Image (cartoon, rainbow, N blue to C red):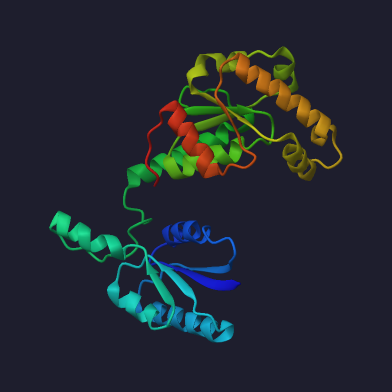
Amino acid sequence: MRRTVFFISDSTGITAETIGNSMLAQFDGVQFDTHRLPFIDNAQKAEAASLRIKTKYAQDGHRPIVVNTMTSRALCDIVAGSGALMLDVFAPFIEPLEAELGAKQSGAVNRSHGLVDFERYEARIEATNYALAHDDGLDVDYNQSDVVLVGVSRSGKTPTCLYMALHYGVCAANYPLTDDDLDKLELPVRLRPYRSRLFGLTIDPVRLAQIREQRRPGSRYATLKQCRWELEQADRLMRRENIPFLNTTHTSIEEISSKIFEYLGIERHMY
């Protein structure tokens, strides 16, 4: 079975898509064709979106599903005229909140991901710049770091650091364990002052070999033997030095980050 899903928002559509995909993931036997329609913030755009949904309905013969985070009731009604199944993410919460707060919703569009707090935005930019500057040991001044990820090359350190920086404003650096580090089985000297900020990432050796083969085909660096040796040594090193670590093979970046925050006691809000 295949069904068409539209994520519609008066802003970026990130919230609608995130929540929508979480709901759709609960249905194993259905394949979904998804489309994101962001910035539907006036009647003309809503009419165009409604027409697109109606057209898809006519083509497929199945009612499309709309995951909607538009705050304007008028715009929601226009899209609902398409005949789609409307799943309004905010609707169940607005009335109870209005009653609790004794205030009416503003109905203003583009609030969820709009640039309304310049200080927090600057924090994200600075954290991202920090992550890039301290990627793969390019810069080893970790005084400003909130966390330093350690692990063998291609174990997921860089994307995790960038995710934490972009979404939480966390200053995350990463240090790749080299063959020299792994031979010695000692924590590198440059990392010792920051032991409380260290967190290790590991990965299945077969998966690591696949990733490395794409990066450097036919190299010793990508052989399964080399990957196994590095990971075994890294495991010994992190256990010997009492560095907490996590296997990233079947774990999303979001989950990795959450577990790092929980273990190290980092409390940040997603932007």
Res 128 visible: no
Q: Position of residue 72 (x, y in %)?
A: 29, 71
Query: Which image quarter: residue 241?
Result: top right
> Outermost residue, left direction?
102
- Vertical relation: 93 (above or below) 244: below
Residue placed at 77% from the left, 31% from the top?
A: 227
> Outermost residue, right direction?
218
Question: In what quadrant of the picture does the N terminus appear?
Answer: bottom right
Res 174 visible: yes
Which one is in front, 145 or 76?
76
Q: Position of residue 250 (x, y in %)?
A: 62, 42
Which one is in front, 234 or 218?
234
Q: Is residue 106 left or right of residue 174?
A: left
- Vertical relation: 181 (above or below) 103: above
Residue placed at 36% from the left, 71% from the top?
A: 41
Residue placed at 56% from the left, 17% from the top?
A: 242
> Outermost residue, bottom direction?
58
- Vertical relation: 217 (above or below) 242: below
Q: Position of residue 9 (x, y in %)?
A: 40, 66
Residue placed at 49% from the left, 76% from the top?
A: 64
Q: Is residue 133 left or right of residue 271?
A: right
Query: Which image quarter: residue 109?
Result: bottom left
